[in-house]
Image (tube, rainbow, N blue to C red):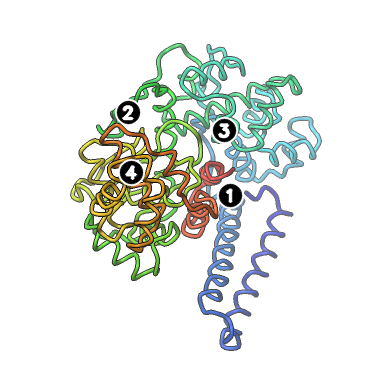
Amino acid sequence: MITNQRQYRITKAQLGKFQAALSDLQEKRRELRGVHPDLVRAQADALQSQMEELQELLAEYESLAAGREKVLDVASFEDLPKALIKARIAASLSQKELAERLGLKEQQIQRYEATEFACASLGRLRQVIDALGIRVREEVFLPNTDVSLTGLMSRLQKIGIDRDFLLRRLLPSETAAHLAEMAAGKAKEATNVVLRAAGIVARVFGWSPGAIFTREPIPMSLAAFGTRFKLPARVDEVRLNTYTLYAHYLALLVLQAAPSLPRKALSDDPRQARAEILSQNGSLDLRSVLEYVWKMGVPVLPLRDRGAFHGACWRVEGRNVIALKQPTTSQSRWTFDLLHEYWEAAQDPDDPDRAIVEVGEPLTSTEGNEVEANGFAGDVLLDNRAEELAKLCARAAGMRVERLKSIVPQIAHREKVPVDALANYMAFRLTFDNKNWWGAANNLQTRGTPPFSIARDVFMEKVEFGRLNGLDAGLLLQALSD
């Protein structure tokens, strides 16, 4: 956000440089015959995107400075910092003039606005509000409520949000760092920072900030995300509920940031899917399958937090989005899970809103629909011969599980299918006989680039972060961080 005339002039100069660079690139296109046209187009698109961002910032500042936009009412603490900056500009007050009204130095106002008032006390915030003449609803400051860092941490812990998850995934880095210093006793407790943190958390989960500081139960029902929930033993249901709400919010952001994806009819025929993937990408590795799923209009969000669910597929107003959260480093397992979720996305195409969350490992489930999804994934990866190949392995091993570790690679090489994919499918089939062969299957996996990194790279290529506000874009980037 532009906060003063100096920043406005700098931003305008930057826009001029980008416009000149884009014009120069367009003039030299004919000279760039040795460069792949996709690279030239990508460079032009990047320049255009940066120009549009600068133009939006300039337009916002110009509108405020011209008095075309008024800031009169603030409904949430989260909106307060930027509202104060906008209100000052709309009132035609410079940072120096506001400082004089408050009996402060200009540099102090500059620091406040640069940090979005993170270091300002509640008393100071009220002074700025009064000086600018804007209205802030009384509930924004949560009167009659004990707002404290201890209260916030305790309440969040009870609803499945531990301190590490709060600081690492939910809060912007500055707010997280300030809270961490306060918790460690290195900084004085600031109520406004606690309120800001509570406001951000409440926004993500759809609660009111005040609810976090009360003793009333916060409703978090998995029923809102579909009926396909069978909780395995020893699952932390509270954390599962909370993490599902968090992941669903991220999924909505992904759909918002990928508006140009096509809406194609998805097929649950493994032969068709296999043929299309090979036709488009030439192979069936993780990146190729990811590219295919994205081209079919289904964004794939990779997550790497431990616990809760392993995969999910949401459909919102007819648009599907898949979340994968598999801790293994096996690309084959990730590919299998992705195809499993893709099958789920293809079901009930006339239902505009749908939700499936895989609490257990998809490959270990023997439930009806899960078996069909696993069969689809196995057939895509194993040339539509998953069951046939599993039976070949069983016969060759003489029905002796201990022999499969040597038999599966032999059958895979002879039949020209991936060893790791066949090992995974074989382990899945053995679960029907209550036999655990996952340790051996894991030893037959091909290792390489971490699958999370592959999925994240594809995600970063496809998503338009500029379509999200700063807070949501940061939240999504934090979900993808190591």
Query: Position of 384 compared to 444: left or right?
Result: left
Residue 313's label in the rendered image is: 4
Q: Nearer the viewer, mark 3 or mark 4?
A: 4
Q: Secondary structure at mark 1?
A: helix
Under mark 2, the amino acid is Leu
Mark 4 vs 1, N-terminal side: 1
Q: Find residue 346 and report its horizontal and vertical position in percent.
A: 25, 51
The answer to whether any part of residue 281 appears in the image is yes
Measure the C-alpha gap from mark 3 to mark 1.
Answer: 15 Å
Mark 2 vs 3, N-terminal side: 3
Q: Find residue 152 and report its horizontal and vertical position in percent.
A: 56, 19
User: Circle 4: is it few (<14), some (14-19), or many (20+) Cα within 10 Å?
Assistant: many
User: Circle 1: is it few (<14), some (14-19), or many (20+) Cα within 10 Å?
Assistant: many
Residue picked out by circle 1: 64
- Between 435 and 95, the residue placed more toward the observer is 435
Measure the C-alpha gap from mark 2 to mark 3.
Answer: 40 Å
Measure the C-alpha gap from mark 4 to mark 1.
Answer: 42 Å
Residue 134's label in the rendered image is: 3
Residue picked out by circle 2: 222
